Amino acid sequence: MVGVRPVLVAVVPAGLDDPTRPSGGNTYDRRVLDALADRGWRVSRRPAAGAWPRPTQEDLDAFGRMPRHLPDDAVVLVDGLIASAAAGALVPESARLRLVALVHMPLDTDEERNVLRHSRCVVVTSRWTGDRVVRRHGLDSARVTVAEPGTDPADPAAGSPDGTRLLCVGVIAPHKGQDLLVDALTRLTDLDWSCTAVGALDVEPDFADRVRDGAAAVGHRMRFAGPLAGDELAGAYASADLLVLPSRAETFGLVVGEALARGIPVVAAEVGGVPQALGRDRSGERPGLLVDADDAGALAAALRVWLTDPRLRVRLRHAALDRRQTLTGWPATADRVSRALLEVAR
């Protein structure tokens, strides 16, 4: 622990620690705030209830009272899901508060632009996100700090010789593209495989029902495990051969890092910050395959290659095991955020 830092007011979505609502954004907020406290920041969490980033008027009215009661010059870190929808409450207080917006997923709205332009600093979770908010909102790039999500060290997954155990991790929702995965898998019924989908089924229940109905075509080979955390999630990774990420939108892809930390290759849609998260090993080899977004045929073709080409599997596994040696840890993430906040606090 270092010397005592200023008070940091952290405005986060309510339910940040809810195990039934695991998400990359919640994990990032929780891990960074805990690490900032270890670095001497006096962190005061202010959970904001509401359907962020699409709050009701009642949500906005309740939230609006909070910024007005914060002391002058307070360093206030606001999760982007809230900040991008609460310009009416935050911008009027921005002259006396030291606002910092933490953007996980840019919304590209006028309200978001207003809040980010009135923030002293904008923290983003990937270079892709940083480039996007600078370009879309006309921000000074010097005020944007990139702090990629970290990963925890993990033992390498054992892997099976045939690579048949597929894993998909993410809330069952349209932007995560599980419908594309189901479509792709129905084209591979001539091959041997199993797939476990980990993620909450009640966030977008109509979509989740459609995905499960579609998966009936492949029978017991696709299993929906619901949200997992801790040892249960670690166990799902440990038994996987390949992570599949069919997302239509992804600012970074924290699950990519979680897979690579275990030496598990990845097949993913080439969207947002995913190519950055996947990266390359020290010889320049990608530890996985990238496919066009929103293209079930391309996803099916990549999975077929993985399942039928033993030499490809060996090459990608070797690259993934090497890539795990160069992943960013959470301490480095927290250090970047802490330095940005200290500049704002001066």
Image (cartoon, rainbow, N blue to C red):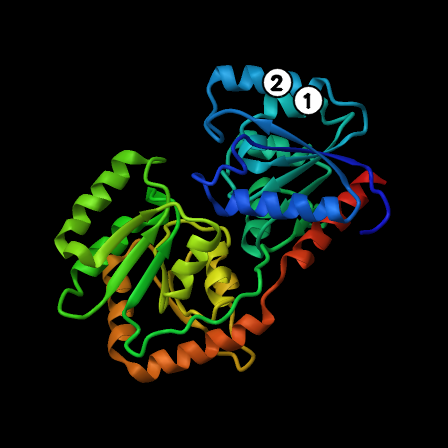
The amino acid at mark 1 is: Pro
Q: How many marks?
A: 2
> From this viewpoint, is residue 253 visible?
no
Q: Determine crowd level at label 2: few under 14, some 14-19, many 20+ residues with C-alpha closer than 10 A.
A: some
- Vertical arrangement, residue 294 with respect to residue 304, above or below: above
Image location of residue 70, percent across then percent down: 74, 22
Question: Residue 213: horizontal and vertical position, in percent?
Answer: 17, 44
Name the residue furthest bottom: 311
Q: Is residue 333 left or right of residue 97?
A: left
Q: Nearer the viewer, residue 332 or 162?
A: 162
Residue displayed at 57% across by 60% down: 151
- Point 27% across, 70% down: residue: 164
Residue 82 x/y as whole percent:
56, 31
Label 1 to label 2, Cα distance in Å? 6 Å
Image vertical order of residue 63 relative to residue 176, above or below:
above
* 48 displayed left or right of 199: right
* Circles 1 and 2 in contact, beta carbons < 8 Å: yes
Q: Quadrant of residue 308?
A: bottom left
Displayed quadrant of residue 244? bottom left
- The residue shown at (69%, 52%) is 334
Q: Which residue is mark 2?
A: 64
The reply to whether residue 9 is visible in this rendering is: yes
Foreground residue among 128 and 318: 318
Residue 289, image x and y in percent? 38, 69
| Quadrant containing the C terminus in the rendered view | top right
Residue count near mark 1 (Cα–Cα under 10 Å), binned few <14, some 14–19, many ≥20: some
Seen from the viewer's position, the closer of residues 144 and 134 is 144
Q: Amino acid at mark 2?
A: Gly
User: SS at mark 2?
Assistant: helix
Q: Which mark is residue 67?
A: 1
